[in-house]
Image (tube, helix red, strand yellow):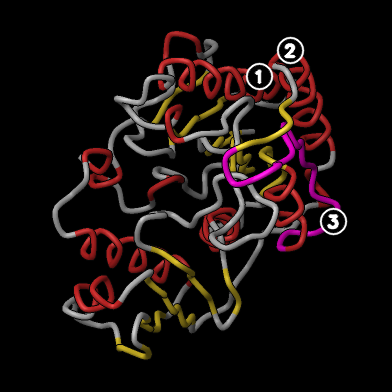
Amino acid sequence: MRVFISCDMEGCTGIVHGDQLVPGGHDYGRGRELMTGDVVAAAEAALAYDEVTQVRVCDGHGTMRNILIERLPSGADLVSGPASSRALCQIESLGADFDVLLCVGYHAMAGTPGALLAHTWIGSLVAEISVNGRPFGETALNAGVAGDLGIPVIFVSGDEAACTQARAFLGEDLVTVPVKRALGTKSAVCRTPPDTAAAIRLGVLTALDARAARQPFRVPGPVEVAVSFHNTDMADRASKRPGAERTGRQQLTFTCPTFTDAARETWALLEWTAAEQPEWLR
């Protein structure tokens, strides 16, 4: 059995503030350590499972060069490198030869009440991404691509709001591990690394035991995506990309035959709209 781990940073143990999230932030080094700790716990647990033969980790945050590869266990490999060179962003290289998807360090979608560091893909641009009229966050977006491949999401860790949201999309039987509870957009009651590492390990093993009951999250086509931006200038830039229709002052809409096509086009549209690439996209 092959296990794919997609990881973000905002939902990791002890992460509460932008200073921990990007190179140049005074706490970024510690943020990398905390993120790596959660990923190592998940990867070690998966590799300890008798039927698992390989674990792939995909760094899905910011520069996508955050995880300390020297800390990963033998038997794991790492997808590293900026989103500008990827088509599937946080699940790059996921293919039908993988059996399950684990999401580590995930956060809630943009606009979620009671959530920590909530956003959707590019927080500086995106107010909302909706799919067939329903707002989607990163968990659902990645689960939908995996679903096209027949791969179920079996585990999610993050803040409490992210875990609640994941179960709302993927089913109440989804194994989730909340590592913190938001007090505001940049503060939380955080569990300690020893406690969250133990919980993540147990959660991954429990999820692998229960994987046969999990179904892929499928979004049948055609798929209509509406991207709402924070302001009209952003929508103006986005509207210059062929294929999307301006459907509001700050919104563009397009339709694709499959969910994977829609996810690829959504990411391409956001890269286009970013115009001059910020440092973390390079």
What distance separates the C-alpha of mark 2 from that of mark 3?
26 Å
Label 2, on which residue? 194
Residue 65, image quadrant: top left
The structure residue drawn at horizontal position 63% and vertical position 39%, both measured from the top left corner, is 102
At numbered mark 3, what does the secondary structure look like: helix, strand or loop?
A: loop
Q: Residue 252 carries which label?
A: none
Q: Which mark is residue 41?
A: 1
Q: Which comes before the other along the chain, label 2 or label 3?
A: 3
Q: Residue at x 85, y 52 (%)?
A: 173
- Classify the position of the C terminus by image quarter: top left
Q: Residue 237: image x %, image y %?
A: 19, 73
- Residue 161, placed above or below residue 203: below
- Residue at 55% in and 19% down: 34
| Numbered disc in front, either 2 or 3 | 2
Horizontal and vertical percent position of residue 218: 63, 68
Question: Residue 172 bears which disc, if any?
Answer: 3
Specify whether residue 198 is painted magenta: no
